[in-house]
Image (tube, rainbow, N blue to C red):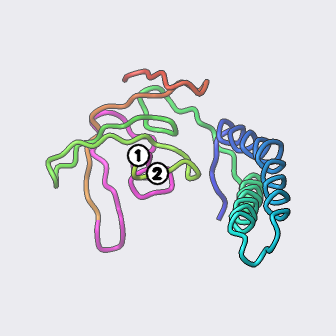
């Protein structure tokens, strides 16, 4: 499956790869060499930890490079007052009589613990392109769905700042 990313996501990924290759990789190699110099490798915890960190960094670089190779670039712009990527959406859930606020993001930035909902999730997909006061049906599976009402939409500026515009 291809990841959907914005041009801003692409730039962040490229910046992380560059940082990992130019800053973290040389330090990790140096740490491995220093730990190796301490002698018996079979009982050298520092060596094992340094190798593990170096390998994790290389693995992360490979993953990010694969994401860039296979990603589908999507536009982050949406019509004013409409739910899209980088919008903060407050929804009312009648079933629970609660309001929740989510930031709609691309799949590589989704994190439900921080209320960042991916456009590929059932809720994110259902909310896309709707406006304030729309009743939206969220289909989770063939046997379960629920309704939400969009109460508020705020759009983040495309320049990467966290400045919001309310609709």
The residue that disc 2 covers is 111
Mark 2 and mark 1 in contact? Answer it, CB < 8 Å. yes
Residue 108 image position (x, y, % from top left): 59, 51
142 to 28, vertically: above or below: below
Residue drawn 41% across the image and 52% down it = 112
- Which residue is farthest front? 39
- Which label was assigned to residue 143? none
Query: Front-most of 55 and 106?
Result: 55
The residue that disc 1 covers is 114
Apparent side of residue 141 relative to residue 54 in the rendered image (left or right): left
Query: Front-most of 50 and 55?
Result: 50
Label 2: how many Cα within 10 Å (few below 14, some 14–19, many 20+): few
The image quadrant of residue 70 is bottom right
Apparent side of residue 128 relative to residue 58 in the rendered image (left or right): left
Residue 48, magenta (yes or no): no
The image quadrant of residue 102 is top left
Q: CA distance from mark 2 to mark 1?
A: 6 Å
Residue drawn 50% across the image and 29% down it = 79
The secondary structure type at the circle numbered 1 is: helix
Residue 16 image position (x, y, % from top left): 72, 43
Q: Which residues are magenta?
A: 115-144
Query: Front-most of 93 and 135?
Result: 93
Say which quadrant the C terminus sits in. Answer: top left
7 to 55, vertically: above or below: above
Residue drawn 70% across the image and 44% down it = 13
Apparent side of residue 13 relative to residue 106 in the rendered image (left or right): right
Residue 133 image position (x, y, % from top left): 27, 35
Residue 46 image position (x, y, % from top left): 70, 63
Residue drawn 22% across the image and 48% down it = 93
The secondary structure type at the circle numbered 2 is: loop
Say which quadrant the N terminus sits in. Answer: bottom right
């Amino acid at each position: 499956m291809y990841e959907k990313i914005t041009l801003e996501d692409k730039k962040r990924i490229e910046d992380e790869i560059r940082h990992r290759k130019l800053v973290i990789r040389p330090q990790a190699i140096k740490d491995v060499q220093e730990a190796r110099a301490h002698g018996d490798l079979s009982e050298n915890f520092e060596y094992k930890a340094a190798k593990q960190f170096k390998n994790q960094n290389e693995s992360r670089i490979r993953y990010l490079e694969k994401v860039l190779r296979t990603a589908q670039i999507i536009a982050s712009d949406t019509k004013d007052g409409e739910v899209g990527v980088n919008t903060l959406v407050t929804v009312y859930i009648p079933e629970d009589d609660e309001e929740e606020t989510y930031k709609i993001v691309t799949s590589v930035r989704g994190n439900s613990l921080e209320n960042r909902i991916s456009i590929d999730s059932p809720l994110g997909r259902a909310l896309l392109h709707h406006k304030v006061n729309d009743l939206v049906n969220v289909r989770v599976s063939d046997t379960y769905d629920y309704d939400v009402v969009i109460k508020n939409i705020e759009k983040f500026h495309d320049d990467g700042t966290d400045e919001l515009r309310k609709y």
